[in-house]
Amino acid sequence: MKKGTVRKILSALQSTSGKDFLNRLTLQLDQAIDADYTFISRINIENHSSTTLSLVSHGKIADNFTYSLEHTPCADVSDDSLCVYPENICAHYPKDQLLVDMKVEGYIGTPLHDSQGNVMGIVVALYETKIEDPELVTSLFELFTGRISAEIERMEHQDALTKLNSELEQKVSERTLKLQETLDQLKASQNQLIENEKLAALGRLVAGVAHEVNTPLGVSLLANSTIESCYHEIKDAFSSGALSKHVLETNLETINEAQETIGLNLSRATELITNFKQLASDFHIDELETINLSEWIDALLSSLQLLINTSDIELIKHYPETNIELITYPFRLAQVITNIISNSVNHAFDQDATHHKFIAIDVHTNDEECIISLQDNGQGMDQDVTSHIYDPFFTTKRGVGGMGLGMSIVKNLVSDSLKGSIDIDSKPGEGTRVNIHLPKKAAA
Ligand SMILES: Nc1ncnc2c1ncn2[C@@H]1O[C@H](COP(=O)(O)OP(=O)(O)OP(=O)(O)O)[C@@H](O)[C@H]1O
Ligand SMILES: [Mg+2]
């Protein structure tokens, strides 16, 4: 062996691993021992076969292949013996056709052991001529067997790990898919439930409206039959020539009263139905628009000024200095603010309240949303009222103008159309604050 051979081999192997390591080592060994073929092979005991992991043929890396161990010297090596045949190998293994075909003369094979001490592979050198220095070959092979075995084991562990990892990934993605499907199903059921709940709410609303409309219609019918009987009384008296001034006057008065009752009740029914239509969100005329919030609120408030002024209430406004642009449905937002302000005007303050009354509008904003707060310093509400405030037809002013639809409309508009949320903070004696949270853009 030339001086420095081992150092040369080692330096060629620096920072290599896996297949690259095996190929470089086989090439280096092949050069050092001057063989015609050198290979490192993995033994498969069950198949009684051997598969090369790296093969050098006449100085060059060649394609790997698998061969049967039957009748070969490699079988003896894999039985854990060092085989050295400097010449005439085919005479010892005449049935090894491969050796015969390759015209191999000399053979040296060394077993490779795994960490448990079992033979896992072999390193083999084949010569087409007699081997001059077999000891050099065996000693060089033996020098590297431990390193080769360790690298093969490491590669196999890594392959197993990669396989396990991809199996695991496969399992995770299968589970994720199943979870996603379950989640989709849940979402579908949730949407269905929400739809059912909306329908149920609409059903309750329709029933409520029907009930409410029934009262003015019933009264109108009654008044109508009163008119009818007056008509017959006048007609009968007239036909019989007995129509006195008194009979005519009292009947005309009754007819007049009944007709007024009918007028009032029919307007109430119309009002109820208009509100119901509003509640059922038939708002296709209102389109998304970009508004400058403070300017827009100012314009809205000026239209409400009369209502507020006649009640001797001061309007206090706080807007941020910078412009706030909001993409929203202005008509619906106007309904929301109008309903809340008219509630403050109608419910917050007693007729004979003497303190300084105010309604304050504050506008705040952050990156995602804009908050409009409407606060009055009126009498506030108790827990019982606030817990029912969004129920359709809930009012504490029945018979004196209240229909109990205002806040229920507000709630529907804010959460469904304007894609925001609403909360109320109110305590008896401390006034009421309504906060409307709106996204900077109400999705279309
Ligand atoms: N700012 C407020 N201060 C005190 N009570 C309030 C205030 N806002 C609402 N309420 C109470 O909540 C109830 C429900 O309000 P809502 O707007 O839904 O109906 P309403 O004002 O009575 O009738 P409608 O709005 O249909 O004319 C009111 O009757 C009132 O008792
Ligand atoms: Mg109201």
Image (tube, rainbow, N blue to C red):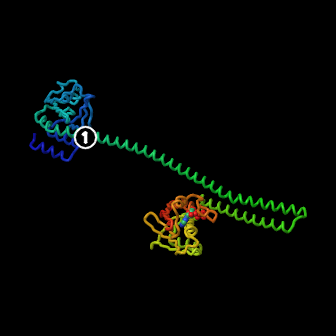
- 248 left or right of 26? right
For the N terminus, which image quadrant? top left
Say whether residue 157 is visible. yes
Image coordinates for residue 315, horizontal then vertical, percent: 52, 74
Does label 1 point to a residue whose CB lies under 8 Å from ligand 1? Answer: no
Up-down relation of residue 162 to residue 334 (above or below): above
Q: Residue at x 18, y 47 (%)?
A: 14
Up-down relation of residue 277 to residue 151 (above or below): below
Q: Quadrant of residue 288?
A: bottom right
Image coordinates for residue 173, horizontal then vertical, percent: 39, 44
Say whether residue 286 is visible. no
Residue found at the very far right of the displayed protein: 241
Q: Quadrant of residue 174?
A: top left
Pick the front one: 274 or 396: 396
Mark 1 closeness class: few <14, some 14–19, many ≥20 residues within 10 Å: some
Q: Residue at x 63, y 65 (%)?
A: 400
Figure label count: 1
Image coordinates for residue 306, horizontal then vertical, percent: 59, 74
Pick the front one: 212 or 152: 212
Q: Secondary structure beneath disc 1?
A: helix
- 216 left or right of 104? right
- Amino acid type, residue under disc 1 in the picture: Met
Image coordinates for residue 84, horizontal then vertical, percent: 14, 30
Pick the front one: 330 or 104: 330
Up-down relation of residue 229 to residue 311 (above or below): above
Q: Which residue is mark 1?
A: 155
